[in-house]
Amino acid sequence: MKTAPPESLIRTWVWMMSENNNPQLNNKGRQNLINAFGSMQKAIEYIESIADAKPQ
């Protein structure tokens, strides 16, 4: 993987995937994550790692 996209962009793509009433938006968000990370699994692992690293 190259340099990870900014967190705000990742959040936007995840939001796009949550738009159940718009399949095109949902698919675009999913495809952007796959393009950036190589797979959804790697995207999920990265998102979990940045969530775990944040102080609560």
Image (tube, grey):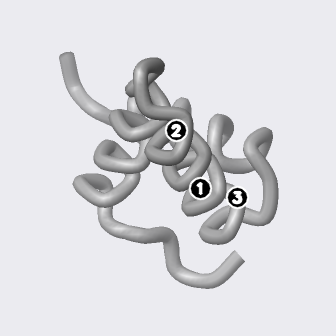
Residue under label 1, please give it.
33
Residue 26 numbered tag: 2
Question: Could you tell me which secondary element the residue under label 2 belongs to?
Answer: helix
Q: What is the count of numbered marks? A: 3
Amino acid found under the numbered disc labelled 2? Asn
Figure quadrant of the C terminus: top left
- Of 26 and 49, nearer the camera is 26
Figure quadrant of residue 8: bottom left
Please report the residue visible at 52 percent of the width from the left and 38 percent of the height from the top. 26
User: First in sequence: mark 2 or mark 3?
Assistant: 2
- Of 47 and 19, nearer the camera is 19
User: First in sequence: mark 2 or mark 1?
Assistant: 2
**Does residue 47 lie above or below 29 as drawn?**
above
**Separation of residues labelled 2 and 1 (CA atoms):** 11 Å
Residues packed near mark 2 inside 10 Å, few (<14), some (14 to 19) or many (20 plus): some
Figure quadrant of residue 1: bottom right
The answer to whether residue 44 shows anywhere in this view is: yes
Circles 1 and 3, Cβ within 8 Å, touching? The answer is yes
- Of 22 and 30, nearer the camera is 22
Residue 34 numbered tag: 3
Expressed as whole percent of the image width and height from the top left, the position of residue 55 reads: 22, 26
Farthest residue in the bottom direction? 2
Amino acid found under the numbered disc labelled 3? Ile
Viewed as shown, does residue 21 lie left or right of 34? left
Amino acid found under the numbered disc labelled 1? Leu
